[in-house]
Amino acid sequence: MCSQQHNKPHLANVRQRTLLLLSRADSAQTISDKLSQYAWQCLLASTSQQAIVLLNSHQVRIALAQIDSHSHSLATDIRHIQHHFPHLLWQALTEHTLEHPCHWLFAAHFIDYHHLPLDWDNVNRSLGHAEGMAKLLAEGAASIERHEIDVLHEIQGSHPCIAQLKQDIHKLAHTDETILLSGETGTGKSLCARWLHTLSRRAEGPFVSVNCGALPASLIQSTLFGHEKGAFTGADKRYIGHIEQAEGGTLFLDEIADLPLELQVNLLHFLDNQHILRIGSSQPIKVDCQLIFATHIDLENAVEEGKFREDLYHRINVLRLHIPSLRDYKSDIMMLAEQFLHNTAAGQKRQFADDAVESICNYSWPGNVRELQNRVRRAMIMSDGPIIHADALGIPSHLGKLARTALPLNAAQLDANVLFKAVADNHNNISAAAKQLKISRSTFYRLIKKCNIQR
């Protein structure tokens, strides 16, 4: 079947390579014998079932399909094989041209094809390149998978809510939709934002983090959107704002509820059209970046109070990820404490005394993981010996009691008895009662009304 004669290739130091040959033609064995001269071991299969059995017992990266009069059924077999082994790179051996009715197979399944009669040297080179590419793709996929596992392993805890958090981060990391992270202070929202970026397709781009609550009111617009030289007094040069700095990467806006209302409008415009205007310029600039927002504030309540724009709230609340509070996975608290102790001790032998363990487990941690980490650091400094006692943690008993009365932001968990107790504990001072429950006065009054409490 070959019109060209070649001397047998010199195979010294050439390693044996394996490929799948899917063919129903009588010449399949001849092709296999010819390729063996180039150090290729062909696994011969005439059906998808045979191919799958062979592929399950051999490490194969590339496949050859011989296209003949049975092209339609062959295409069905290839799809079946690809379903089980999607990493395979396929090449075709064919007598047909691109004008033949089966030409759609080439684009649908194959990275290359070879006409009969065959130039075997060229076939060998092409197969060698394909195997090299398949190896690179496999290594890249494995590297990405290992990276994802390593990153998600950093989220400590075995509680179901932590396992769910890992799953959610993995899902959301592969989207470009706006993400809103909610959760109490200290739960790790900024860390989750960085994990989302690291696992995303934008991981090679910049990760720009902005704490909206830490920006001076007079500089927020310039900091976010940038300005041109001479735009205002003191603008002696052009400044590229944080939004523009995030081009090709991720922009993380933490404490978004602290953004002034007038700037919320500008942010809404950017979300709608992905263009910004530097101060002092009339030239729109397109910015392509992933947007992640975070807040510890009840945004629904902020909207009711007129402190946050409703249209902006609906625009950023596309995909919401709630970061659990430490008290939601109390079974992991000692594991986390031990981990922080190990990291802080830097090789020193330190351990918690029984009273410290009791204090850690009984405290409700209103400052969440951040507070736990800081108190462990404090204990390391305040302890004179290798044993860390409860007093070194600095958890006053009245703080623990107060924290246990604190309520989550989920209003459905509030009831009349809790409201009555908070009012009584604070001698009918509504502001103090609301502060104790970690909610606003307006929310407190709204809940009073909801519970039909007569004032």
Image (cartoon, rainbow, N blue to C red):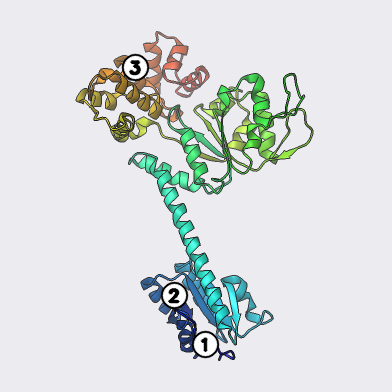
What label sits on residue 187 in the rendered view? Answer: none
For the residue pair 63 and 67, the one nearer the viewer reads as: 63
Residue 153 placement (x, y as % from top left)? 38, 44
Q: CA distance from mark 1 to mark 2?
A: 16 Å
Question: Percent position (x, y) of residue 417?
Answer: 37, 20
Q: Marks 1 and 3: which is nearer the front? A: 1
**Earlier along the polypeptide chain: callout 1 or callout 3?**
1
Q: Nearer the viewer, residue 189 or 98?
A: 98
The residue positioned farthest toward the right in the image shown: 282
Residue at x 40% of width, y 24% of height = 367
Is residue 248 toward the left or the right of residue 236 in the image? left
Q: Which type of secondary structure does the marked residue at label 3 adopt?
A: helix
Residue placed under numbered mark 3 in the picture: 399
- Name the residue carrying label 2: 14
What residue is shown with label 1? 7
Task: Relative to 256, say whether 203 is above or below.
Answer: below
Circle 1: element type: loop
Q: CA distance from mark 1 to mark 3?
A: 87 Å
81 up-or-down from 341: above or below: below
Question: What residue is at 51 percent from the left and 75 percent from the top?
Answer: 78
